[in-house]
Amino acid sequence: MEVYVRQYIKACVAFGWEGGPEFRTSVTEMQNKAEKRNADWSQPRHFFSLPFQNIRHETYLGLREMFMNRMGRWGAFLYYDYLDNTADDEVFAVATLDQTEFQLSKESMVEGIPYRNNVYALFIPDEDNPGSALESTITIRVNGIVTTAYTLDYDRGKVYFNSPMSGGEQLSWSGGFSRWVRFDQDRLPFSIDNKNQSGFIVNGSVELIEVNTPREILS
């Protein structure tokens, strides 16, 4: 069994969704109240809290299926972040001489200080087939001109150009993406709170946390 699967949870979350990036910073306080701060992580780890309210029994079974298949916190799968899932002509690198491999990213710029958040899972949900993933349509530009002379690693968000760069080219990209996540729990507590003609009405929530990419391209 693969530890990673290109699948999404087959259920829609309710209002009350929470999620976002998390960093880890070590802070040492000095006697004079000064601080020594160290950024332990170079990249953020995203977290998500997903409430499922008043869902039907068959919808719960789809969510349970993912939890059982992934064995709780063990296996990874895809999650589509509702607040951050698209790049729009984002600059991801300025090429160096002979460089061919690049990591896609999104840039945060504050007062001239840049920070690049890497983007890995180049997939989007298949609206016609709940739970399934589609490879995202990615557009790559070199100095503003669209190119197709490259291959993509959709699992790890990497671009491999067919020819080495001359150096100094500005590279940008557009497209949708998801995140590799796992359950942050080994229990799946849901409650039966009502019943209608279709059966039980179920409520509960799950916690997800972002994980690193697969070490190798998935088959």
Image (cartoon, grey):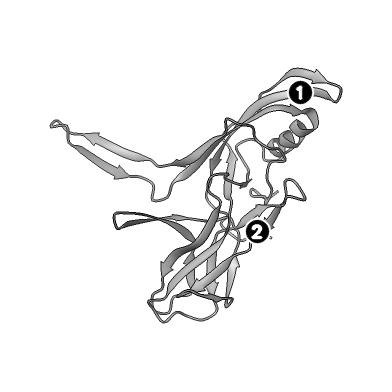
Q: Is residue 123 left or right of residue 198?
A: left
- Where is residue 104 shown, x and y percent of the image? 49, 62
Badge 1: few (under 14), some or many (20 or more) residues near its Cα, within 10 Å? Answer: some
- Where is residue 22 shown, x and y percent of the image? 43, 41
Which image quarter: residue 92?
bottom left
To which residue does mark 1 refer?
Answer: 201
Which one is earlier in the sequence, the residue at label 2 or at label 1? 1
Q: Secondary structure at mark 2?
A: loop
Nearer-the-camera pick, 140 or 156? 140
Whole-number angstrom distance, CA of label 2 to CA of label 1: 37 Å
Residue positioned most to the left? 32
- Where is residue 96 shown, x and y percent of the image? 38, 75
Q: Tag 1: residue type? A: Ile
Q: Tag 2: residue type? A: Leu
- Where is residue 202 shown, x and y percent of the image? 73, 24
Quadrant for the C terminus, please: bottom right
Nearer-the-camera pick, 25 or 112? 112
Badge 2: few (under 14), some or many (20 or more) residues near its Cα, within 10 Å? Answer: few
Q: Secondary structure at mark 1?
A: strand
Nearer-the-camera pick, 8 or 3? 8
Question: Residue at 63% of width from left, 43% of height from top?
Answer: 75
Question: Residue at 63% of width from left, 63% of height from top?
Answer: 137
Can the viewer see residue 186 in this picture? Answer: no
Question: Residue at 52% of width from left, 58% of height from top?
Answer: 87
Question: Residue at 71% of width from left, 39% of height from top?
Answer: 66
Q: Is residue 215 left or right of residue 110?
A: right
What numbered label is drawn on residue 218?
2
What numbered label is drawn on residue 188?
none
